[in-house]
Image: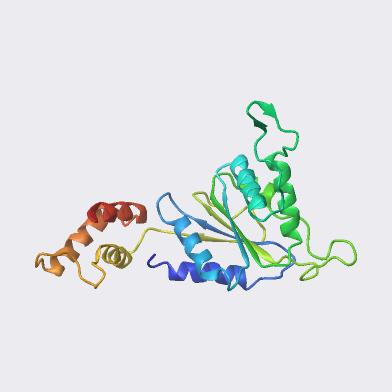
Amino acid sequence: FVGRDEVIRGIYSSLTNSMGRKSLVQSAIVGIGGVGKSQIAIEYCHRCFNVDYDLICWLRAENPASIAASLRQLAFDLGIIEIEKFRSVDGVSNANYVDDFTVAEEVKRRLGRCRCRWLLVFDNLEEPSIIQHFLPSGLLGAGAPGDQIGYEGKFTGHVLVTSRLDVTTWAENGTCHRIECFSPSESEHFLVSALNDGEGNLGGGGIDEAYILQDLYILAEKMGHLPLALSMAAAYMQR
């Protein structure tokens, strides 16, 4: 992972500076396909886990079914439910089956009352309106007397979205970070990092690195400095 430090700092500032607010704070990473939205989200998670968050949940957000299925898997991973995943086994109806959307409701409820610092990542959201059905519900402090709760009346988590769409309208308390293609210097840094031999050297056989850098610049220009295209080109050259 190279570059994008300013973007990650912006995401960090917009989310972590508001921990414990009564409204659920949300942030979106938007841009065209292949620009590196998911990789930025992954890097943000990597840097912040165990420092700013105790729990990070990655959800496939292409449609409501994929989000519900991801929340179901989360419920299994956390031990929230132990119910058989499949509706039927060998053609026999499973009486213990609970559908994904019912499980998702339970996960939402628990996250809304969770004491730990959590982050929900909705990756590749294609329809902004559907996210409202899957955001954690309720606030800490809204339960029965004696409940073990954290910040009374406040959320202890955040929501991060990646999308090709401009989703600035889906939340009153949301921020939007628009991602562009690499700059020429970022493209060069990315390709050099991907192609060096581990000792900071490019190429081989006595080839002048200045010529290699010139060729990499031309390649990046032809690829439009799109991170996904550059990644595929670097993988091909590494063969």
Q: Position of residue 88 (x, y in %)?
A: 66, 31
- Considering only vertical position in the picture, is 50 above or below 39? below
How are the residues colored?
A: rainbow
Identify which residue, 197 or 191, lies in the foreground: 197
Where residue 33 appears, as percent x and y from the top left, is 42, 49
Q: Quadrant of residue 95?
A: top right
Residue at the (58%, 41%) spot, across then down = 63
Residue 195 horizontal side relative to residue 63, left or right: left
In front of the other: 196 or 175: 196
| Quadrant occupied by the N terminus | bottom left
Q: Going by the picture, which residue comes out furthest to the front?
A: 90
Which residue: 10% across, 66% down? 207
Quick check: 210 above or below 216? below
Q: Which x, y percent locates residue 19?
A: 67, 71
Furthest residue in direction left, as rendered:
206
Q: Furthest-top residue in view?
A: 91
Q: Measuring 19% from the left and 65% from the top, which residue is drawn there?
A: 213
Horizontal and vertical percent for residue 145? 90, 65
Front residue of 85/211: it is: 85
Compare residues 205 and 24 and report the one nearer the observer: 205
